Image (cartoon, coloured by chain):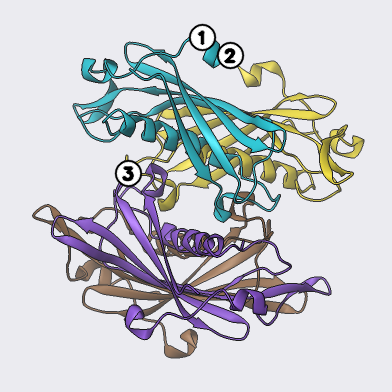
Chain colours: A brown, B cyan, C purple, D yellow
Amino acid sequence: MPSEFTLSHRVEFAETDMAGIVHFANFYRMMENTEHAFFRSIGLSVHGGGVGWPRVAAACEFFKPLRFEEIVQIQLLVAEVRNRSIRYVFRFWKDETDGRVEIARGNVTTVCAAVKGGTLAAVAIPDSIRALIQAAPPEMLA
Amino acid sequence: MPSEFTLSHRVEFAETDMAGIVHFANFYRMMENTEHAFFRSIGLSVHGGGVGWPRVAAACEFFKPLRFEEIVQIQLLVAEVRNRSIRYVFRFWKDETDGRVEIARGNVTTVCAAVKGGTLAAVAIPDSIRALIQAAPPEMLA
Amino acid sequence: MPSEFTLSHRVEFAETDMAGIVHFANFYRMMENTEHAFFRSIGLSVHGGGVGWPRVAAACEFFKPLRFEEIVQIQLLVAEVRNRSIRYVFRFWKDETDGRVEIARGNVTTVCAAVKGGTLAAVAIPDSIRALIQAAPPEMLA
Amino acid sequence: MPSEFTLSHRVEFAETDMAGIVHFANFYRMMENTEHAFFRSIGLSVHGGGVGWPRVAAACEFFKPLRFEEIVQIQLLVAEVRNRSIRYVFRFWKDETDGRVEIARGNVTTVCAAVKGGTLAAVAIPDSIRALIQAAPPEMLA
């Protein structure tokens, strides 16, 4: 049962803004892309299986700029698996001449939802999904 | 029956790229936003009424750069109304010290489509919609 | 000295995703657009004047979905003006049949920065800018 | 001297819209990403070396929808190398049960530009770059 996953991404031109760095809103897309790649890595898709995963909250702190064509490693950590929601922590890393540095850190809380009577309602995470995910140990999240 | 419509838009920071100008892919979004505002101006929504409007082709030529906080006028012209498709021409204008200049020109061909047997298929444009739209005279398109 | 500002925005088609609602990353762009419109409302631009405003942190909670063509009011509140940074709170509202509802709430912390010796460094907010902004009373932020 | 390059891309959630398919504006970003990966494949970056590559024109035709998590192959073909500009053709492919199908086809014309007296002006493509690129044979473009 994995509790961790890392996606590698090379920064695209359209992700930058006139300040010459990756626009901050794109960090939230990178977190989501990593979450979805994590789901695929355990044989699931975030889309399908009768449930969806709307976002409840998302936050990010920005430590260092990220530039065009740089490679960023987006590390997903399963911070908490609750009855109907999952909270992920994301740590963004890039290699500099003096070693790997953390350039941003974020988190996303997502709720398991199913269509009930025409609207989307939170439901318990199916056991089949829960069985595939395990919370990361606290030291990884620190 | 209108054949022309203009949407005004102030350039957003996230629309720029590291070259300091609006990223070219955003011109296609601006064309679509203008098309949708045109539909609202004649009492319609591109979404609903049983039909949708998938894109068949879109093109744009870029004459001058567009920058953060500049105001661009996106002029829609109904170039052609066919049985199942509409072709729009879009002219992008901004004010400079020596007058209004055209900074880009594009076009979008969109087809009227309805869900038939589970898939989307092209259908004749409903008369109720056709009655609200008229092709622009050639001199406006030149 | 204003401590509050509201930007109105009609949801664009490209802001939606396959779940039929506004993709959550676009809420961060909406917060930024409101911040920039606030700056313009007090006679400033976030770009220019020798300083820039990189983001230090941004967060958002999502209460209700936002859909294509809906109008959202994005209310900016100046939560805190520190020596070198400003923290804004953003409340997203839309009108429903039974009144105005808050659909999301976020915050952005941005630091005043100037180019010093080739790199961007945090500096004290110029008095001329500080004089134009006032922190909102706590009850507005609650 | 290569005249062809293919980039593989898995569709991201944020690239879709409420119609359940990739929003058409994202095809232009995919063309650009492929162009940039092509440049890297021949040891260059589109950013740097004293020249930039602003877009002069871009067009795309859409044949079939592209969906979340599908893998698309974006094939770049060097259609024409002129004195100061390059025109690329892009063919988008995906695998279906009965074989590979072309889902879209586009082209981008980009001009070699350098900063001259404060503004960007078209210049002859440096021989060092020209020597690394060769136009594709006509049959590949058909």
The residue positioned 30% from the left and 62% from the top of the image is C93
Q: Could you say which is closer to the camera, residue C25 or residue A5?
A: C25
The kind of secondary structure element at disc 1 is helix
Q: Is residue A52 visible?
A: no
Q: Is residue B92 visible?
A: yes
Tell me the residue that label 1 is attached to: B138
User: Going by the image, does B137 lie left or right of B86?
Assistant: right
Do the residues bearing badges 1 and 2 touch, measured as CB atoms within 8 Å? yes
Q: Residues within 10 Å of mark 3 (few under 14, many from 20)?
A: many
Q: Could you say which is closer to the camera, residue C118 or residue B74?
A: B74
**Label 1 and label 2 in one chain:** yes
The residue positioned 31% from the left and 46% from the top of the image is C68
The kind of secondary structure element at disc 3 is loop
Amino acid at pointer 1: Pro
The kind of secondary structure element at disc 2 is loop
Tell me the residue that label 3 is attached to: D18
Amino acid at pointer 2: Ala
Real-space CA distance between mark 2 and mark 3, rounded to the nearest whole angstrom? 34 Å
- Disc 2 sits on a residue from what chain? B
Q: Which mark is residue B142?
A: 2
Q: Quadrant of residue C6?
A: bottom left
Amino acid at pointer 3: Met
**Label 1 and label 3 in one chain:** no
